[in-house]
Amino acid sequence: MSHNVVVVGGGVIGLSIAWRLASGHDVTVVDPTPARGASWVAGGMLAPVTEAWPGEEELLDIGAASLAAWPGFAADLGIDLYTEGTVVAGFDAADAAQLDIVADYLARQGRTVDRLTGRELRRVEPTIGPSVRSGLRVPGDLAVDNRELLRRLTSSAAEAGVEFLREPVRAVRSGAVELAGSTLRCDTAVIAAGAWSSGLHPALASAVRPVKGEILRLRARAGTLPPPRHTVRAFVESRPIYLVPRADGELVLGATQYEAGFDTAVTAGGVRDLLVYGERVLPAIAEYELTETAAGLRAGSRDNLPLVGRLEPGVLVAAGHHRNGLLLAPITADAIRAMAAGAEPPAEIKAADPARLER
């Protein structure tokens, strides 16, 4: 049975949901600036294993299930994936110890990573600097050009019949999405507005918060070393950073992390820190062109798990994905499509049920 569905939010999660739902429903996406926000500023890593940390086993399981869905998801959109995998660098002795914690934890979870000395790491990725002491190699990780992904999702959703309404949303309740001067009636509303979801429904008021992140985009110039082939994650003096190559010679360097409310200004200190720490891992970037600075607001949750499920009859939520919005887009879209049809979602996503917050 076809339903009238309103998806509030046009980032990677909202667009993925709308696109998947369009095959059987009448879908409207409401967002003043679709295909922007945190999704536009993301690095594009699809890396549940290198994001893993002790105590977050359910998030690892959700991420691994979504990663397995990504090749088909990308093929349906006609978008390429980066398949070189990830290397993780530890700059000093304390960073190397942190990598040991990650590797030991992953081994206990049955996930395989290769431990490397600094010299072995430079044989895998020659652009890494001589001061890096140790590393890991994770061949199964993927990456995607986030901006090309947003463009493809927008065009694919529109071709499938999704309508776009560029207006701000004031609130969402059962059967209705309230705009500034009118109300959209619907069978199902899906709140997928990222960090702004907290202001749209009482159940989300303290469940989702903004976490600011700054990124830089750089480009190799004539005479400089090219960007790395792999996605490079690193701990530098216990600070996590990432460097993600793009097919056009660009390199995304990120990311700072602040609890700063809804502030999206790029700070001089944030740019400085990213360049300083990034250069310690890849010295060649000192000669790169700095092409862009940007900041976005990740949607954090209390326990780092996303919120995917039912808030009340006719209202679903898909928010709180924090650093994993791109990674979890396929499994989140499949879950919301199943719930909208009254079917069972993927088993792994059940850990993200927002009912856990009441418990």
Image: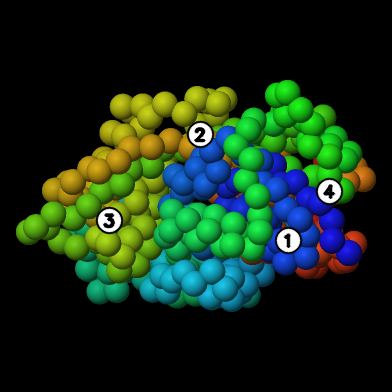
The furthest residue to the left: 223
Asked whether the residues under the numbered discs 3 and 2 touch, taking CB atoms below 8 Å apart as contact, a structural biologist would say: no
Asked whether the residues under the numbered discs 4 and 2 touch, taking CB atoms below 8 Å apart as contact, a structural biologist would say: no
Q: What residue would you read off at disc 2?
A: 212
Q: Amino acid at mark 2?
A: Lys
Q: Which residue is at 17% across, 49% downward?
A: 288
The percent coordinates of residue 225 (x first, y second) are: 15, 61
Asked whether the residues under the numbered discs 1 and 4 touch, taking CB atoms below 8 Å apart as contact, a structural biologist would say: no
- Crowd rating for badge 2 (residues with CA inside 10 Å; few <14, some 14–19, many 20+): many
Asked whether the residues under the numbered discs 2 and 1 touch, taking CB atoms below 8 Å apart as contact, a structural biologist would say: no
Asked whether the residues under the numbered discs 3 and 1 touch, taking CB atoms below 8 Å apart as contact, a structural biologist would say: no
Q: Amino acid at mark 3?
A: Glu
Which of labels 4 and 2 is toward the front?
A: 4
Mark-to-mark CA distance, 3 and 2: 23 Å
Local SS, label 4: strand
Q: Which residue is at 29% across, 73% downward?
A: 124
Point out the tag, 1 or 4, that comes first from the N-terminus: 1
Q: What residue would you read off at disc 4?
A: 188
- Crowd rating for badge 3 (residues with CA inside 10 Å; few <14, some 14–19, many 20+): many
Q: What residue would you read off at disc 3?
A: 250
Q: Quadrant of residue 338?
A: bottom right
Q: What residue would you read off at disc 1?
A: 21
Mark-to-mark CA distance, 3 and 4: 40 Å
Q: In the image, 98: left or right of 243?
A: right
Point out the tag, 2 or 1, that comes first from the N-terminus: 1
Q: In the image, 305: left or right of 156?
A: right
